[in-house]
């Protein structure tokens, strides 16, 4: 009687560790929540689907010993959110480490396609990916590429000190799709603090700002902060915005573009 052959990699059910909150949500949207064996404490959506998935620390302080015990076959990280040494350590015990870095809404299509191809043997993944990509394409077509940005905008993610986003971040490039030009005019590089510049509060370019957007995360800006932000840019309109819609790439990208179009159109 012939010996049974070992299962191929494709036949082995994937055990996925997602260390990126927005990717965790995307995996769930692709129908892969039941394949998740680990997530970070910031991977909170969709809450019901993730309730039983073990947490292995934060995006910057992953508990590698606990993660190794969970025996993932795939781990997903992000250049901006996770440490390079974490990715290096994962390669010691994870068969496939997937490194993501969407720099703008246009890159999300490739991310969806990459995950769909990686987990193509899972039922329904291809169909869900096609639907997500079609929705994204429609929203991208309803906006426009950077280069037509005319409205100077200050997008604040933190206070004490005030912090904003560099031009080459996902957030800035999403805002550019509706003609909003983020200030200051700096690039932050692939990762690190330069991607989120701190303000002194008396920069000359602050006088150019026409819209100040107070993000709901990572700092939880609320109505109590409107007057303080107004004093920073007295000439600008100050508004509270949904930070998850504007920074979580994946299934929220299309919704974020719709949301931005509504914000930009409001008088």
Image: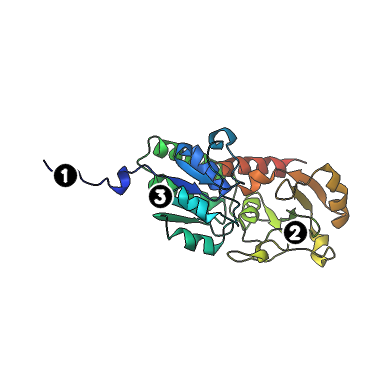
Task: Say which of marks 1 and 2 sits in front.
Answer: 1
The image position of residue 226, as x and y in percent, is 84, 47
User: Does the image show residue 207?
Assistant: yes
Q: Regarding mark 3 in the picture, which secondary structure is present there?
A: loop
The image position of residue 260, as x and y in percent, is 67, 44
Display coloring: rainbow
Q: Using the numbered discs, state the Cα–Cα distance from disc 3 to disc 2 in whole angstroms.
A: 37 Å
Which residue lies at the image location 78% right of the left edge and 63% below the top edge?
199
Q: Which residue is mark 2?
A: 163
The image position of residue 207, as x and y in percent, is 83, 61
- Left or right, residue 237 beside residue 6: right
- Left or right, residue 137 beside residue 266: left
Q: Quadrant of the C terminus?
A: top right
Task: Say which of marks 1 and 3 sits in front.
Answer: 1
Q: Regarding mark 1 in the picture, which secondary structure is present there?
A: loop
The image position of residue 206, as x and y in percent, is 81, 61
Task: Indicate which disc, 1 or 2, sits on the residue closer to the N terminus.
Answer: 1
Counting other residues with Cα less than 10 Å from the Cα at mark 3, is it few (<14), some (14-19), or many (20 or more)?
Answer: some
- Residue 231 sits in quarter: bottom right
Q: Using the numbered discs, state the Cα–Cα distance from disc 1 to disc 3 in whole angstroms.
A: 25 Å
Q: Regarding mark 2 in the picture, which secondary structure is present there?
A: loop
User: Does the image show residue 109?
Assistant: no
Task: Indicate which disc, 3 or 2, sits on the residue closer to the N terminus.
Answer: 3
Task: Indicate which disc, 1 or 3, sits on the residue closer to the N terminus.
Answer: 1
Q: Which residue is mark 1?
A: 3
- Left or right, residue 209 beside residue 72: right
């Amino acid at each position: 009687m012939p010996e049974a052959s070992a299962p191929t990699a494709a036949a082995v059910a994937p055990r996925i560790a997602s260390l990126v909150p927005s990717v965790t949500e995307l995996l769930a949207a692709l129908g892969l929540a039941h394949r998740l064996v680990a997530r970070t404490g910031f991977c909170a959506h969709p809450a019901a689907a993730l309730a039983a998935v073990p947490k292995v620390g934060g995006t910057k302080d992953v508990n590698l010993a606990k993660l190794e015990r969970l025996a993932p076959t795939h781990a997903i990280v992000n250049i901006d959110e996770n440490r390079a040494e974490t990715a290096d350590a994962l390669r010691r015990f994870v068969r496939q480490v997937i490194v993501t870095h969407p720099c703008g809404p246009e890159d999300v299509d490739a991310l969806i396609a990459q995950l769909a191809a990686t987990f193509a043997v899972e039922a329904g993944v291809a169909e869900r990916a096609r639907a997500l990509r079609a929705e994204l394409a429609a929203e991208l077509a309803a906006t426009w590429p950077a280069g037509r940005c005319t409205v100077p905008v200050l997008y604040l993610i933190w206070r004490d000190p005030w912090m904003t986003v560099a031009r080459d971040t996902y957030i800035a490039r999403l805002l550019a799709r509706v003609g909003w030009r983020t200030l200051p005019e700096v690039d932050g590089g692939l990762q690190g603090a330069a991607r989120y510049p701190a303000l002194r509060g008396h920069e000359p370019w602050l006088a150019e700002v026409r819209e100040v957007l107070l993000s709901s995360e990572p700092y939880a800006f609320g109505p109590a902060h409107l007057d303080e932000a107004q004093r920073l840019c007295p000439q600008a309109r100050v508004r509270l915005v949904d930070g998850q819609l504007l920074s979580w790439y994946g299934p929220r990208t299309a919704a974020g573009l719709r949301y931005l179009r509504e914000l930009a159109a409001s008088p």
